[in-house]
Amino acid sequence: MTTYNPPIDDINFCIRHLADIDDILKLEPYDGIEVADLEQVIDESAKFACDVIAPTNVPGDQQGCAVEGNTVRVPSEFADVHRQFVETGWQAVGGSAEFDGMGLPAITAFATNEMVQTANISYSLLPMLTSDAVEAMEAHASDELKASYLSRIVTGQWAATMNLTEAQAGSDLAAITTRAVRDGDQFRIFGTKIFITWGDHELSENIIHLVLARIEGAPEGVRGISMFLVPKFLLTPDGEPGERNDVRASSVEHKLGIHGSPTCVMQFGDKDGAIGYLVGEENRGLAAMFTMMNHARMGVGLQGLAVSERALQHASAYALDRVQGRVPGLEGRAPIIHHADVRRMLMLMRSQIEAMRALSYSAAAQTDISLHGADAETRAAADRRLSLLTPIVKGWCTETSEQVTSLGIQIHGGMGFVEETGAAQFYRDARILTIYEGTSGIQAADFAGRKVTADEGRELSLLLGELREYFAGVNNETMKGIVAGVLAGLDQLESGREWLLDNALSDPTAPGTSSFNFMMLAGTVLGGAYLAKAAAIATSDDSSEDEAFGKEKLATAAFYASHVLPRGHGYLSAMTADPAITMAIPAESFQA
Ligand SMILES: Cc1cc2nc3c(=O)[nH]c(=O)nc-3n(C[C@H](O)[C@H](O)[C@H](O)COP(=O)(O)OP(=O)(O)OC[C@H]3O[C@@H](n4cnc5c(N)ncnc54)[C@H](O)[C@@H]3O)c2cc1C
């Protein structure tokens, strides 16, 4: 059984200094809330995550899920966990007070979500998708739908799902064929969705599916897609779950990882059609669904950090315990943590995890400002920053989690490759993160295309300028080498930006051959920059941080600057290589 020790010090540090919580608490909805209140919530959530959720991670993986009769069976421990999760209010942390949420800043929910995800990724997808649906409903649903459904989704009494994917429509949502037939004020939905996370189960009284479908006669492509709310149980006149709607899970997938999360094939309209209600405007469903998807993309990026943290804790415990070989200066045979190469692996894991946390919390802080900033320009600026960083958090943190969880196995040696130690589960669970919620290729295309090229690189330039200005003011002697590494990285990112703007429109293959490396360059450099900022703050003369915390942060940032930031050269070099090199071998030559 693996334990989990939530890294509360680092989480609180990121909230205080990188998410600038004092500024967030000045926003109007948070009037009267103190930092200490948030830290208490985070403390309690940490206890729940490690005492209640974490012990279910291995049994959940072993039991998996299956369709049984008219429903889906999920790991037996999850029912009690979810009941407690909802009853103690954890689902409602970030929900607005108007709909029975706790009304706390979104960054608080980000922190509590990190700990839930680290404790058990498979389970965490249930509350994650439920809160993602809240975002979409708040932004796009009619007052009537909000009144009937929203409070009970915010509190977690009812769960929610996201139904986009069909067999022929994965990355390409323009190919969606699920039909919506008008029936008075409502619609009847017919179609099959695949890969629907937590599509069915009995942990909640009702499941609210948000479904993309085409109203009959709608235009082809993405401009003809609408979003519908389809409840598992239709509501009675007094608003309670009543008759079962015409929607069911016909099977669950057998997967490489996240075995505790039921990934369902959903049948809508086997009989007379599943009754659905339009959310937002007709034919504007993809835009509405993007509200949910953007929230989910930040959540999946956070999963990359979360599973990496658990893998590190697991590997550290093993490295302290496993005795093998001798080390100069130590008597007898040594625990492997004393071997410098094992330390290198642990530091690679730890420094990248702290960089992921530094970057993702800095990005997530923009959510509160984009929603509640004092004026329209402040809100729009925060929204632009969040939009720029979202594909990097999703793409880079999840790609990095595959390397970090793989290192976790390596530290276990052969025992990492057998299931009994549990190291393999983190690697298997991490493998989905670069695929769902838009593959890394799609994140990279979004970053390079919509977020940089379409914006003529303005927002990225603004960010680079702000970071350069910040580091120009860091004169602390111990930070010198780290700052030099970060500034070199920012220059590389600037060069990547310029290359993209010069080549994106003139060569149609250039965005495709360069965007993944550009996204990885951006993540590597920005993760390093925010980690370095954390080190500068934690070691500044007026820092109130614990001295040991400051020293370790500095050591982690120095390791990252010397071992990880140099990868920026490689990413930039691959990014700016002639696109023709990638396309040189014709498609038909790949035939076996
Ligand atoms: C465990 C699991 C849970 C999931 N949960 C949900 C869920 O809850 N709801 C839901 O709706 N869906 C869900 N999905 C579906 C998931 O979002 C899709 O699998 C994903 O978007 C990729 O689509 P695809 O599998 O059809 O792959 P494809 O779209 O066929 O992609 C295959 C490869 O081609 C690349 N590619 C495709 N198009 C492009 C392009 N235009 N440019 C560059 N590269 C491209 C991709 O990057 C990828 O490498 C889930 C999937 C899994 C496996």
Image (cartoon, rainbow, N blue to C red):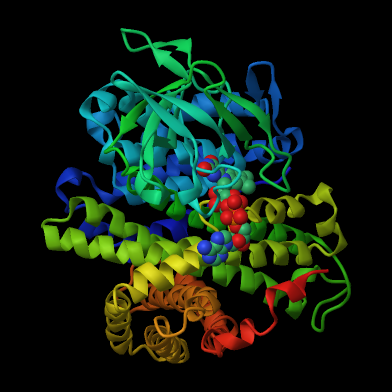
- 96 or 192: which is nearer to us? 192
Q: Is residue 270 visible?
A: yes
Which of the image's four quarters has the N terminus? top right
Is 591 above or below relative to 95? Answer: below
Q: Residue at x 80, y 51 (%)?
A: 421
- 256 or 49: which is nearer to us? 256
Could you tell me how many numbered marks the image carries? 0
Q: Residue furthest front?
A: 217
Left or right, 31 with respect to 90, comes to left
Q: Residue at x 30, y 18 (%)?
A: 184
Residue 284 falls in image quadrant:
top left
> Where does residue 216 sit, x and y in percent of width and height?
39, 33
Q: Residue furthest left?
A: 375
Q: Residue at x 45, y 88 (%)?
A: 492
Left or right, 150 with respect to 197, comes to left
Residue 389 falls in image quadrant:
bottom left
Is 508 above or below relative to 291? Answer: below
- 442 or 539: which is nearer to us? 442
Is 279 above or below relative to 169? Answer: above
> Where does residue 31 sit, x and y in percent of width and height?
16, 45
Q: Is residue 118 visible?
A: no
Which of the image's four quarters has the C terminus? bottom right
Is 394 above or below relative to 176? Answer: below
> Where does residue 119 sit, x and y in percent of width and height?
59, 44
